[in-house]
Image (cartoon, grey):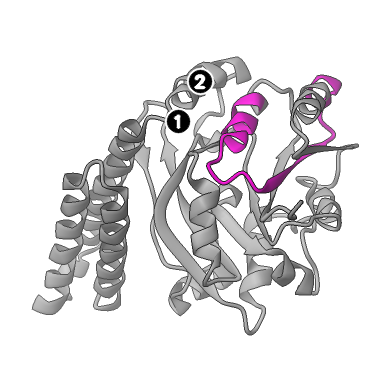
């Protein structure tokens, strides 16, 4: 039997209310050559029991139960990866969901990268979607991530080769206070010479940021996310939210530029770049049902956005 192409990390530290939705979205991947590591970081016994039930029903699932580790239990992720056999590594939060194309798109991404990102469509509590787009291949983006409190993507959208990870001087480890644990990890890749970096402008999942849901109980969050989980296979539903998020991004980009007065300092060429960005976003909205075309158009939008920023 061939080794799995991917190792998927799923850390969890709380009751299992949301866990089954995330696990099922992994098990439903069109690319089935993976191993799923559910890493219980001091999670209660009922969470471990739910994870072990999945492991009994699917041999691709393994459970690692640990006492609560420092910070977000990053050291347990590193320990799990010592026994990983996938060529590439992805990760999903227990409150996020993957589309069934996530690992297939990650394989395409990793064919030309050692560390990279896809796109997770983030959902506000009122259901409005949003995304942020930038290209990890761009030195300016990497510079921001290395030197500022700027994180282009979270673990659910990340991918890296296991070989690149094992070549790092230090892997997953507790982040210092004041630094997000994922950004602290990404900086280790970004500081490593000789690695290839890339972003693939394809939406492959839904995110429900906890920072926007501070007053919601886990039961309320389950009631919110379950309808999205039930429609993960509905390509039209996914694309509609992806298009809405891209159009919101274009509107937000233009509004921020206007508020800053940057439009007054740019010449006609820069204004043309902004117009190109919005034309590309509108074209994405018109490409319903054609995911390949949407991917190409999203890349054009990303290129236009970067060019506009460069001329600001």
Tell me where the magenta segment starts and ends, as one range.
20-48
Name the outermost residue toward the front.
1
Please give left or right for residue 309 compared with residue 146 in the image. Answer: left
| Label whose residue precedes the other's in the sequence (1 or 2) | 2
Q: What residue appears at the point 63 percent right and 52 percent down from the top-left corner?
A: 90
Looking at the image, residue 241 sits to the left or right of residue 47; the answer is left
Q: Do we see residue 267 in this rendering?
A: no
Q: Which residue is mark 1?
A: 232
Mark 1 or 2: the one toward you: 1
The CA span between labels 1 and 2 is: 10 Å
The residue carrying pointer 1 sits among few (fewer than 14), some (14 to 19) or many (20 or more) residues within 10 Å by Cα, namely some
Query: In percent of the image, x 61 and y 71: which residue is there?
Result: 114
Q: From this view, report whether residue 309 is shown above or below residue 285.
A: below
- Residue 157: x and y in percent read 54, 51
- Secondary structure at badge 2 equals helix
Left-right relation of 186 to 153:
right
- Label 1, secondary structure: give it: loop
**Place of residue 212 in the rendered image (x, y in percent of width and height, measured from the top left):** 49, 34
The residue that mark 2 highlights is 226
Magenta-drawn stretch contains 294: no
For residue 140, which quarter of the picture?
Answer: bottom left
Q: Is residue 102 visible?
A: yes
């Amino acid at each position: 039997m061939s080794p799995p192409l991917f190792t998927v990390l799923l850390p969890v530290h709380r009751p299992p209310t949301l866990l089954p939705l995330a696990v099922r979205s992994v098990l439903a991947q069109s690319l089935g050559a993976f191993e799923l590591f559910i890493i219980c970081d001091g999670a209660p016994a009922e969470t471990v029991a739910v994870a072990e039930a999945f492991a009994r029903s699917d041999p691709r699932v393994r459970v690692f139960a640990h006492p609560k580790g420092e910070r977000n239990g990053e050291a347990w992720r590193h320990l799990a990866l010592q026994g990983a056999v996938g060529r590439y590594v992805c990760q999903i939060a227990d409150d996020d969901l993957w589309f069934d194309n996530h690992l297939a798109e990650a394989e395409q991404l990793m064919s030309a990268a050692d560390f990279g990102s896809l796109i997770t469509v983030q959902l506000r509590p009122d259901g409005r979607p949003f995304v942020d787009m930038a290209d990890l291949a761009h030195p300016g983006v990497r510079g921001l991530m290395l030197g500022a409190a700027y994180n282009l993507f979270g673990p659910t959208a990340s991918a890296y080769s296991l070989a690149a990870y094992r070549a790092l001087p230090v892997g997953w480890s507790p982040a210092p206070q004041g630094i997000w644990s994922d950004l602290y990890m990404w900086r280790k890749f970004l500081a490593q010479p000789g690695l290839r970096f890339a972003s693939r402008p394809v939406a492959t999942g839904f995110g429900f940021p906890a920072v926007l849901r501070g007053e919601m109980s886990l039961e309320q969050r389950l009631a919110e996310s379950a309808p999205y989980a039930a429609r993960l296979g509905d390509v039209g539903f996914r694309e509609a939210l992806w298009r809405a998020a891209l159009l919101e991004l274009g509107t937000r980009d233009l509004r921020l530029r206007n508020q800053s007065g940057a439009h007054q300092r740019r010449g006609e060429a820069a204004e043309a770049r902004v117009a190109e960005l919005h034309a590309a976003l509108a074209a994405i909205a018109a490409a319903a049902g054609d995911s390949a075309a949407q991917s190409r158009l999203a890349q054009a939008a990303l290129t236009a956005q970067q060019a506009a920023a460069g001329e600001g």
